[in-house]
Amino acid sequence: MLKPTIAGLALLCLAACATHPINRDALRLHAERNCRGRAAVSSVYAVDSTGIGTRSVAFDRCMRAAGFVSEG
């Protein structure tokens, strides 16, 4: 009973890997959502020439780690 169950799970995992990849726009939306959550707990902002920073450093760093350039 255990061997067929393991074999079935392995086949499901292989089938999931063989499906179409997620659209790049959808990947970006997921990354933005996750990075906004991470940036919400960080209070580090970049300071511009006016002395007031409005860009979250944590958000930019997270988006770069996910392979995207943050817009702004």
Image (tube, rainbow, N blue to C red):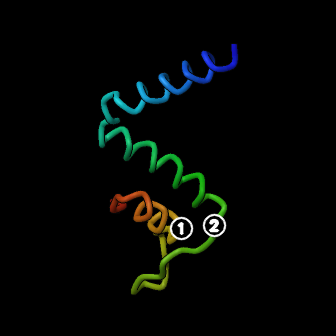
- Marks 1 and 2, Cα distance to the nearest angstrom? 7 Å
Horizontal side, residue 20 vs residue 56: left or right: left
Q: Position of residue 71 (x, y in %)?
A: 33, 59
Q: Residue furthest right?
A: 1
SS under mark 1? helix
Mark 1 vs 2, N-terminal side: 2
Horizontally, is 39 left or right of 28 in the view? right
Q: Is residue 34 left or right of residue 43?
A: left
Amino acid type at circle 2 is Ser
Image x and y of residue 10, in percent = 52, 27
Q: Establish if 63 lies above or below 30.
A: below
For the point 44% across and 63% down, the residue is 65
What's the residue at 69%, 19% (across, down)? 2
Position above or below: 19 against 31? above
Q: Nearer the viewer, residue 20 or 65?
A: 20
* Residue located beneath label 2 in the image: 42
Identify the image quadrant of the N terminus. top right
In the rendered image, which residue does mark 1 sit on? Answer: 58
Q: Give the image location of residue 47, x and y in percent.
A: 48, 82
- Label 2 SS: loop
Quarter assignment of residue 26: top left
Q: Residues within 10 Å of mark 1 (few under 14, many from 20)?
A: many
Q: Quadrant of the C terminus?
A: bottom left
Task: Pick the residue in front: 32 or 5.
Answer: 5
Percent position (x, y) of residue 6? 61, 23
Label 2 crowd (10 A; few <14 / some 14-19 / many >=20) = few
Task: Tell me whether circle 1 and circle 2 mark residues in contact (CB < 8 Å).
Answer: yes
